[in-house]
Amino acid sequence: MAIPTYEDLMLPLLQEYAAAARPMSIKDLLPVMANKLGLSDQDLAERLPSGRQSLFHNRLHWAKTYMARAGLLSSPARGQAQITQVGTGLLAENPARIDGGTLSRNPEFVAWKTSSASGRSPAPEAEQLGPVREASEWTPEERIEAARADLEKGLRAELLERVRSMTPAEFEELIVQLLLRMGYGTGAAEMARALGGSGDRGIDGVVHQDPLGLDRVYIQAKRYADGNTVGSREIRDFNGALDLVRAPKGLFVTASTFTKDAVHQAQNATRQIVLIDGNEFAALMLKYKVGTRVLGIVEIQALDEGFFSA
């Protein structure tokens, strides 16, 4: 039989998470789902065009990712998921199907889907962009770009999950690695270091912009969980720490988000403070290939007018 689409897999996958009543990985649920759907060995052997992953595993993964962004699943441990109260409530409605329309009941899912490729939060008017065009109305180039954007959104969500599962010390080291990859400190490892731990005086890392250390950027890292926001008090404390070391500028990075008061506090601080939230941090990791790898490159050819006019 044909392997179901990722939307067709949502309802049976959510039901299996409900039956398990504990964290499960897609790898663990794959044989259960295959048996439930009556898939043959030949079906399971079908792979993506790249050949790097089975089609069934890929669609299960995307079904899980989309439901997680809609709050139906949570991620209590690395690579695992379990049903939430929202997911249980949806199953109690006895739906005939779960699809994008169902997930769009959750404002966070709509915000995620409409967020820009930069990783920043969507603009307030994002929901006023008008009806979504049908895929059949798109040009081939538009469909490719939409697929790329969806892949990046899913990857950013996975990166953020991994970051939030790190220890504070690991998070601080990751920030330093990213800054070096971005070119800060001339990209040399000896030009940056994490300083976290007791006695760090509110400074978790430093990047030297020049060999003599005359121009430095100090870092504050808060690996907060989703929903645990950074407020104005933390920004004031960081500004005070920058004053103590006479630093002209600082970078405050969190795996969660900043409150409006925190943003206002940073804008009016005595030192220049740049704020990076979890979504933007994950987008930067993706852009500078920190914690990711290129699976393949798709070449898109176009007519060479110069060849025919020569």
Image (cartoon, rainbow, N blue to C red):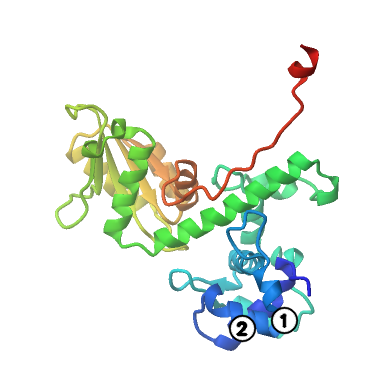
Left or right, residue 17 beside residue 167: right
Quarter of the image where the C terminus is located: top right
Disc 2 to disc 1, C-alpha distance:
9 Å
Quarter of the image where the N terminus is located: bottom right
Where is residue 162, by image quadrant? bottom left
Instruction: Tell me how many marks there are.
Output: 2
Relative height, residue 282 to residue 307 (above, below): below
Tell me the amino acid under the disc marked 2.
Val
- Within 10 Å of disc 1 (Cα), the crowding (few <14, some 14-19, many 20+) is some
Q: Is residue 89 visible in this depiction of the protein? A: no
* Percent x, y of residue 73: 57, 73
* Percent x, y of residue 283: 50, 46
Relative height, residue 167 to residue 13 (above, below): above
Q: Secondary structure at mark 1?
A: helix
Determine which residue is flagged by label 2.
32
The residue sitting at 39% across, 54% down in the picture is 231
- Within 10 Å of disc 2 (Cα), the crowding (few <14, some 14-19, many 20+) is some
Left or right, residue 124 beside residue 285: right
The residue sitting at 67% across, 84% down in the picture is 35
In the image, 70 versus 107, the foreground residue is 70
- Please tell me which of labels 2 and 1 falls first in the chain: 2
* Percent x, y of residue 200: 18, 51
Q: Secondary structure at mark 2?
A: helix
Left or right, residue 239 beside residue 44: left
* Percent x, y of residue 42: 70, 73
* Label at residue 37: 1
Residue found at the far left of this picture: 199
The residue sitting at 41% across, 47% down in the picture is 290
Tell me the amino acid under the disc marked 1.
Leu
